[in-house]
Amino acid sequence: MAQNIYDREDFFAGYSTLPRSVKGLAGAPEWPAVRALLPPLRGRRIVDLGCGFGWFARFAAEEGAASVLALDLSENMLARARRESAHPAVTYDAADLDTLELPAASFDLAHGALAFHYVADFARLAGVVHRALAPGGALLFTVEHPIYMASRQPRWLALPDGGRAWPVDHYSVEGERRTDWFARGVLKYHRTLGTTLNTLIAAGFAIRHVNEWSPTPEQLADEPALADEIDRPMMVIIRADR
């Protein structure tokens, strides 16, 4: 079973203060780039993998999706999603992405937001999702960028010339990485970008688009703190088609 860090009260309390937790999709600066890669949602059958507070699930339902199966390991997440993101087209259920099984050809779109880096066996998950998508279906997800993850304790280092550097630590060594983020010992799984893409290809997907996300000039003007994302990307957006 995956580490259920979101059901730890100290972690959940901290996570709930993030802009994306408070404002939903409007608080996620990568959302415009993600939305641009979405297929039309009307009439689609969608599975949301790691649905969190249910923001995307409700958005998809309001866009006319026929059904949304929204899955998360955390009962804290699901409880809030049911309270705040309820919609008759959305079904919330508990699921561990490490052991997930889905019926074949049952969905037109699989979505995941910053969840897959918690999955130990990404190859297994990619195979499960590929089988669950109908022909012509799509997988669209964000994942923590491996450059960001490949530091034992993400931080900027000051340089003698007054500049700064991001310390990438053993980028090519894949596997468990632990960090302290709202709680000690948060477990994630580091995979190089090449491994992630090749795993999708091996599962039968065709890579359609890869975005090592950075903010637009307009976003930087509104939120100067996003300037860090210019120097080192925090996440990757990937669309892969069946």
Image (cartoon, grey):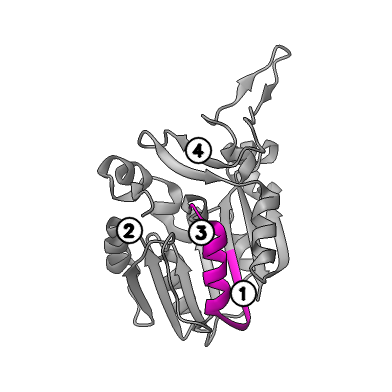
* Residue projecting furthest to the top: 160
* Label 3 Cα crowd, 10 Å radius (few <14 / some 14-19 / many 20+): many
Residue holding disc 2: 77
First in sequence, mark 3 or 4: give its number: 3
Q: Quadrant of the C terminus?
A: bottom right
Kind of residue at badge 4: Arg
Residue 23 lies, in percent from the top left, at 42, 55
Mark toward the viewer: 3 or 4: 4
Left or right for 78, reference 104? left
Alpha carbons under labels 3 and 2: distance apart: 13 Å
Q: Is residue 71 magenta?
A: no
First in sequence, mark 1 or 4: give its number: 1
Residue holding disc 1: 138
Q: Does the CB distance between marks 1 and 2 fall below 8 Å?
A: no
Kind of residue at badge 1: Ala
Residue holding disc 3: 113
Residue holding disc 4: 177
Q: Secondary structure at mark 3?
A: strand
Say which of 26 and 10 sits in front.
Answer: 10
First in sequence, mark 1 or 2: give its number: 2
The answer to whether residue 28 is visible is yes
Question: Which residue lies at the image location 39% right of the left edge and 67% below the top edge?
Answer: 71
Alpha carbons under labels 1 and 2: distance apart: 25 Å
Kind of residue at badge 2: Met
State which region is magenta. 120-140
